[in-house]
Image (tube, rainbow, N blue to C red):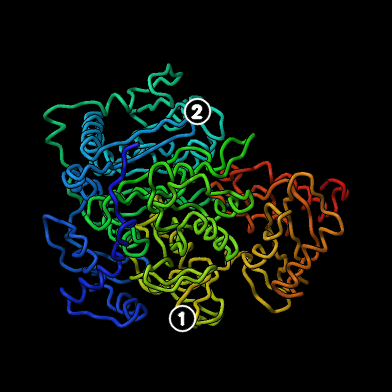
Amino acid sequence: MRELPPTSASHPPVPQIRRYQDWLRERRGLAFDHYDALWRWSVDDLPAFWQSIWDWFELESPTPHTAVLADDRMPGAVWFPGAQVNYARQVLRHVDAAEAAGVPAIVSRNERGDHRELGWRELRRQVAALALHLQAQGLRRGDRVAAYLPNVPEAMVAFLAVVSLGGVWSICAPDMGTNAVLDRFRQIEPAVLIACDGVTYGGKDHDRSGVVAELRAQLPTVRHVLGLRARAGATSPLRPDAWLEEAAARDDAAVAAFEPQWLPFDHPLWIVYSSGTTGLPKPIVHGHGGIMLVMLAHTVLHSDVGCSYHPDTRGERFHWYSSTGWVMWNAQMAGLMNGTTCCLFDGNPGGPKDAPDWSTLWRFGAEVGATFFGAGAAFFANCMKAGVDFAGLPGLRSVRALGTTGSPLSEDVQRWIDARFAAIGKPGMWWSNISGGTDFAGAFIGGNRELPLVPGEMQCRLLGCSVEAWDEQGRSVVGEVGELVCTRPIPSMPLFFWNDADHRRYRGSYFDMYPGVWRHGDWLRITPQGGCIIYGRSDATINRHGLRMGTSELYSAVEALPEVLDAMVVDLEFLGRESYMPLFVVLRPGRVLDAAMQDRLRGAIRSALSPRFVPDEIFQVPEIPRTLSGKKQELPVKKLLLGQPLDKVVNRDAMANPASLDWFVALAARRAGTVSPKACG
């Protein structure tokens, strides 16, 4: 493994947000005594703030913009009219400087241990070669390209090639079933399909050629299919029109001369999807310019991810574990826009299914020299439950920041991980805990390396994000739990939903409760000091005897017990009926929900929260239903137990474990009086 040049080990880099504030003072004459003053300026004067982001990152356009924010309505905001940009162009502008510094663009590894590094010059060559191939097949601006690919370098190369031509990218992970993929791709009518023939996950090889054949048969608009072999050089049952590896191998004068097209600021970049708990998933369209601005600001300023060839952050390596089915894949790829090396792991972070090993991802981070290590909150919780030991991983000393999102990270888990790092000589680890969403491919709340770090809290509202907590009367509150709202537009908010001509689905998703104000659907408490705590989804709230609480607090109490692997609670108060709140728990193998265990669970809730939140009943279940992105299916289970039919409350194909619903269907039937109590086990 190539030795990395010394960076933060010898001198801690200047935080990126400090560099930005120094620049504001020197170039704009703006100085702020504390972060809250900086944040308030950024949301009160949106044009000045977002223009400063454009200038600080030295974004380029061959034509000037006539305004920063020409229309500030939500939805319908108009940003940077007249400007021309291209996401791929922003990535490839770093090629010469990064290549001269000897830092790679992408470092990747899979479960089999196959290690690859892709240099910046080679990245540019492959992007150009593949773009010319797609152009020769008739890909035009605005054509959709559907990808069914794992978290490998080829996925990022394909994305950059597509968007360099003005094509619109959309990707699904190969762990998704045929129907779930078709529910997404049918809506967007793709012209090109790029798909793999198989994946390795959890220690097992999974053939995907049958899924690809079905996709091809069910997507009549597809004119060209590119294939990717799961194993390089292996014989494949897939019969594409061309192989991605071969199309990207071209190297001639046309490839050398290729440049990404200049596109309008709001030209569609990609289509991502809501979790799709009911009905068809919402196909959300984001634009080139908005994504560039927001992801650069959030990744660099708030997660403190530096440029890998800058002298102060030389050798920076950015890792955020994700599948291609989660927007954090898009977020990690954004590192390339700032000249940062991205480190990809393709596989199960917990190791083989039959022999779990939660040190797998940590070993990867240690061996590739990751300086930023991010993953979903559930990953860190699983590491604590498994008792992962860092003693044999001295390479983790290269990590200078941790990131988490997806669900609230408990204080206990954060402190436990901190202790593991302290044991290898890295005390005081900084966390960039963020909360946002696929909806706008960004974060509302996140980190600031210069602010105090309080375990269990996120440090601040992000710059440019006018986030507030609103009570039931629509009043902004501090120190109280309220609805998370955003009162002013952000450049990466959706341009529109695909096939939503009158914007009815778009408006109904975010603006139905407060017209003109984005309601995100989370419970938020902003502390008097400016910290933020997310309490779970506001549509799966517990409301017991007049006290309102998000579910995450109860999970923190219950899942702290070593016997509990997972849990879910729902409150079935509905239309004035008396509240009924069941708790569902997954226990460690060999454990049973006897009277003593029930007493421990009730006692944990009583002491951590209040006797008011002790559940009416506790059930032991095989699994907790989760979406493909790992979120607990609280609302669908709540609706199911209130008597709604299964096909109306959840899309099984949008679930990670659809068989887990069978137990809850039986419980719902029992509650309706149609089966005996024994049907629920």
Q: Position of residue 446 (x, y in %)?
A: 42, 66
171 or 200: nearer the eye?
Answer: 200
Vertical relation: 601 (above or below) 185: below
Q: Nearer the viewer, mark 1 or mark 2?
A: 1
> The residue tagged with tag 2: helix, strand or loop?
loop
652 with respect to 283 (left or right)? right
525 or 386: nearer the eye?
Answer: 386
Q: Dot 1, crowdedness within 10 Å: few (<14), some or many (≥20)?
A: few
Judged from this view, the residue extending furthest toward the top is 235
> The residue tagged with tag 1: helix, strand or loop?
loop
Q: Does the CB distance between marks 1 and 2 fall below 8 Å?
A: no
Q: Which residue is mark 1?
A: 529
> Is residue 496 visible from the viewing direction of this image?
yes
The residue depicted at 80 percent of the width and 65 percent of the height is: 616
Q: Which residue is mark 2?
A: 208
Give the amino acid type for the residue marked by disc 2 in the picture: Arg
102 or 264: nearer the eye?
Answer: 102
Q: Position of residue 411 (x, y in %)?
A: 57, 66
231 with respect to 594 (left or right)? left
The residue depicted at 26 percent of the width and 35 percent of the height is: 139
Vertical relation: 190 (above or below) 541: above
Q: Dot 2, crowdedness within 10 Å: few (<14), some or many (≥20)?
A: many
Q: Position of residue 190 (x, y in %)?
A: 37, 37
Q: Position of residue 177 (x, y in %)?
A: 54, 36
Q: Which quadrant holds residue 357?
A: top right
The residue depicted at 31 percent of the width and 46 percent of the height is: 341
214 or 566: nearer the eye?
Answer: 566
Give the amino acid type for the residue marked by disc 1 in the picture: Gln
410 with respect to 226 (left or right)? right
